[in-house]
Amino acid sequence: MRAGILKEREGSIAIKGAGTGSVSCGRDSVSGAVSQRACVFCGARVVLNPITDAFHLVHGPIGCASYTWDIRGSLSSGPELYRRSFSTDLRERDVVFGGVDRLRAAVSEIAERERPPVVFIYSTCLVGVIGDDVEAVCREAESRYGIRVVNVKAPGFAGHKAMGYRLACEAIMDVISRDPEIPRRREGINILGDYNLAGEAWMVAGYFREMGVPVVSTFTGDSTFASLRRSPGARLNVVQCAGSMTHLARSMEDGFGIPFVKASFFGLADTRSALLNVADLLGSGEVRRRALSLARRESRRAERAVAPYLPGLRGKKAAIFVGGGFKAISLIRQFRELGMETVLVGTQTGTSGDYEVIQSLVSPGTVVLDDANPAELEAFMREKGADILVGGVKERPLAYKLGIAFCDHNHERRIPLSGFEGMVNFTREINLSVNSPVWRHLRGRAAPGGAWEA
Ligand code: SF4
């Protein structure tokens, strides 16, 4: 295909209209490819970490805990326990003799000093190799201290980030299925896959409040043990981050009979249809009338705020590399709303269904790739002359080293980007970055076809 692209990676890269076919996905990363994708443990922790009154204990060497410490800009309206990172800090001696004693001592200290309602123990790569019986420690601690202790068996090497999502969903299901609080009359919705980054779950919950729809629980942004236990009392699950939460939505449908709908709150069009879809599914004319009036009012307000930026954005080229396919699809639509063209789209955990939708949305020549690495992103962004990269913490240095604008759309951001207000913030962010004069000084001479050389 291209110089610098590993042969084993070719099936995971498609160029629309070039006869390269569908994108192969969902497989383990190619050895030596230096994947941008996070490990199983990281996938599990990013989903569970925003449970604010839980104690998150990483059983492994200190590096695993440090890697995932406070990586989300997820806000809490109450407890702050989740902001701290705890580890059993396994050393060489524990590799030889086992880490169970250290784990047991840590759990006892946690239970006696903190008394959290739930402890999540994340078993990382090292524990997967030495084979500590973590499950036995969990059972023992539960019967001794009367708190919930959940084993999240997530050695990083066992698969990739999507497996961690699945494990996190199973851990949540474990928490809510034992002794759930289900009222006689079910009411309201749960929002799944909103991590309350920069307070986004509060904004989205505000829309539903105005529509007259109570939000029972959010998974897992600003959630607590008590709010999770109330979640089986909702009438509908609204799944926002489909990559991480579809498994839980299916389990709740099977276990509690709660149907679910996928909904994106990125971009004006997607936010409007998300609100109206939920109103339709709840089957109330009054809820629909309120949703329509809110969507019209807030769309008008957002369009007025966005309009001054459009001339400076029209025709700019965007590259997208994010965690899940659902977000990538929304971003393509958002860039279209801004008059920008998407020239590269990739995800860490997209499904074949996601890639089909992506291919149907983008223009011929757009590069679509699964589980990319920095060399591929660099090669294709240069080739396509991308003006801005939208990604997360691991993509930021790549963009800056190449002298290209960057927009953080991932865990650690501090600016809300979802909903109507989020579209305005997103536009401002893109404008500030892509039209910054700094890039003129960093980039070298322009090459033919819009590509450039650093
Ligand atoms: S890959 Fe293994 S060692 Fe690395 S952070 Fe993940 S669990 Fe820890």
Image (tube, grey):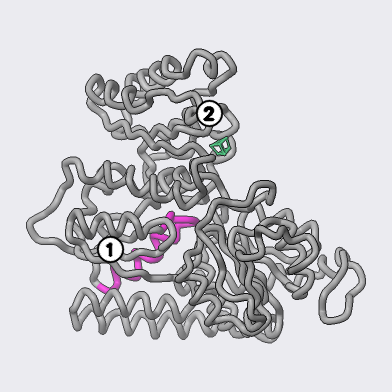
Query: Which residue position is annotated with label 1?
Result: 237
Note whether ligand 1 is within 8 Å of mark 2. Answer: yes
Residue 277 among those drawn in magenta: no
Q: Nearer the viewer, residue 213 or 343?
A: 343
Q: Residue reaching furthest left?
A: 184
Q: Assign ligand 1 to one image quadrant.
A: top right
Please identify the quadrant where the C terminus is shown. bottom right
How busy is the neighbourhood of tag 2: few (under 14 within 10 Å), some, or many (20 plus)?
Answer: many
Q: Nearer the viewer, residue 330 or 376?
A: 376
Residue 200 among those drawn in magenta: yes
Amino acid type, callout 2: Leu
Give the secondary structure at mark 1: strand
Query: Which residue position is annotated with label 2?
Result: 126
How busy is the neighbourhood of tag 1: few (under 14 within 10 Å), some, or many (20 plus)?
Answer: many
Disc with the residue nearer the chain's start (1 vs 2): 2
Please name the residue shown 55% across and 78% down the image.
359
Distance Cα–Cα, label 1 vs label 2: 36 Å
Amino acid type, callout 1: Asn
Give the secondary structure at mark 2: helix
Please name the residue shown 29% across and 74% down the image.
278
Please name the residue shown 59% across and 78% down the image.
335
